[in-house]
């Protein structure tokens, strides 16, 4: 059963990494990904691809990993006791892109599959994933388009999914210690196994296949927009929120570190430059204030009409 499920997923994920990297190189206009293959001592490995100092992307990481072993760490089985004593396989593609231009948003994608087996028992498996957008100087039409494309990708599989996964994304990518959303959201889900394997796999493929279609047009529209040093400094300041979320709240980061994953690959989501400033506050009625006062509040973007910007 394990290989019947794993083989097509691994094939799709490897191809997805290839396709995304090709499209991002084209969008960047000059940068190239460097590949670093790695092996995990306990079983498995992956290939990390990183673009540094591209024309458009300051740093972009697109990683594939497939790790396996005879048992999960206690921290994982404590919340899922049914996984105790099972062999496991975990695989996925994860990416984070940090553009140079503050008018181009940071973006994140993850699609993953997990399966645990024990002789004489049915396998325990699930899919998870999603994508979300973190703008610094948002444009309303970009936000609307991002969510409309996310919705369309899921509607093709099941029209009931977007509403649920959109709310899940808003709830998950939330910095509780700041009482603030990380970005404008998108879609997110985990533990997807309440439908057949083929149907659940279709959800993952819909998400992965829609990513570049949703993100690249935003990059193309905004990458040549002029920006000031003040806007650059605000971008670096807001990147601090990204770091805080990934290190404090992100379950994927924690799982990777606890299962002996490659630290460099797990933390390639970190921005190359970032700044913190004590008790910084935006000027009233400024574009910086609008980010947190309007754009980062939960909104039904997919239901909104495009505006004249």
Image: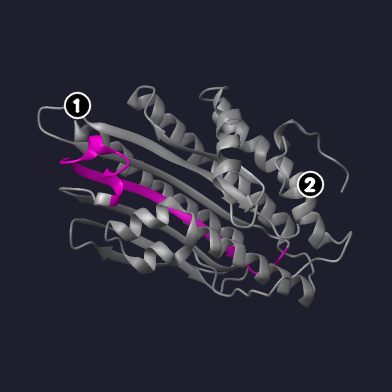
Circle 1 is placed at which residue position?
A: 122
Task: Give the camera-side residue of 182 and 60.
Answer: 182
**Is 297 placed above or below 24 here?**
above
Numbered disc 1: secondary structure: loop
Q: What's the magenta region? A: 75-102
Magenta span has 88? Answer: yes
- Mark carried by residue 140: 2
Q: Quadrant for the N terminus, please.
A: top left
Residue visible at 73% across and 70% down in the picture:
234
**Does residue 166 appear to the left or right of 145 in the view shown?**
left
- Real-space Cα distance between discs 2 and 1? 47 Å
**Is 189 placed above or below 279 here?**
above
Task: Give the camera-side residue of 292 and 305.
Answer: 292
Residue visible at 24% across and 50% down in the picture:
74
Residue visible at 65% across and 69% down in the picture:
100
**Is 21 placed above or below 161 here?**
below
Q: Position of residue 158 (x, y in %)?
A: 52, 22
Q: Position of residue 248 (x, y in %)?
A: 49, 59
Q: Earlier in the sequence, mark 2 or mark 1?
A: 1
Magenta span has 242? Answer: no
Task: Give the camera-side residue of 234 and 226.
Answer: 234
Labels 2, 1: front one: 1
Asked whether residue 64 appears in the rendered view, the answer is no
Asked whether residue 20 appears in the rendered view, the answer is yes
Q: Marks 1 and 2: in contact by CB < 8 Å? A: no
Residue visible at 30% across and 51% down in the picture:
75
Around disc 1, counting alpha carbons within 10 Å, would you say few (fewer than 14), some (14 to 19), or many (20 or more)? few
């Amino acid at each position: 059963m394990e290989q019947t499920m794993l083989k097509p997923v691994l094939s799709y994920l490897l191809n997805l990494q290839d396709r995304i990297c090709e499209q991002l190189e084209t969008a960047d206009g000059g940068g190239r990904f460097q590949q670093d293959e790695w092996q995990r001592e306990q079983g498995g490995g992956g290939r990390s691809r990183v673009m540094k100092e591209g024309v458009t992307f300051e740093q972009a990481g697109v990683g594939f990993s497939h790790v396996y072993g005879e048992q999960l760490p206690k921290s994982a089985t404590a919340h899922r006791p049914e996984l105790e004593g099972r062999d496991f396989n975990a695989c996925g593609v994860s990416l984070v892109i940090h553009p140079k231009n503050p008018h181009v948003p940071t973006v994140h994608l993850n699609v993953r599959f997990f399966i645990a087996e024990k002789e004489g028992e049915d396998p325990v498996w699930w899919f998870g994933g999603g994508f979300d957008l973190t703008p610094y100087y948002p444009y309303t039409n970009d936000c609307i388009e991002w969510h409309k494309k996310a919705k369309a990708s899921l509607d093709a599989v099941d029209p009931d999914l977007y509403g649920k996964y959109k709310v899940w994304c808003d709830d998950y990518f939330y910095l509780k210690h700041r009482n603030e959303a990380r970005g404008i959201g998108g879609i997110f889900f985990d533990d997807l196994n309440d439908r057949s394997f083929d149907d659940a796999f279709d959800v993952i493929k819909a998400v992965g296949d829609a990513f570049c279609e949703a993100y690249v047009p935003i990059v193309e529209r905004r990458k040549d927009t002029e920006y000031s040093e003040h806007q650059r400094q605000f971008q670096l300041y807001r990147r601090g929120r990204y770091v805080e979320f990934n290190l404090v709240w992100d379950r994927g980061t924690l799982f990777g570190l606890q299962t002996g994953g490659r630290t460099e690959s797990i933390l390639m989501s970190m921005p190359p430059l970032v700044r913190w400033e004590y008790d910084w506050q935006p000027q009233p009625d400024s574009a910086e204030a609008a980010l947190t006062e309007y754009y980062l509040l939960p909104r039904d973007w997919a239901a909104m009409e495009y505006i004249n910007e």
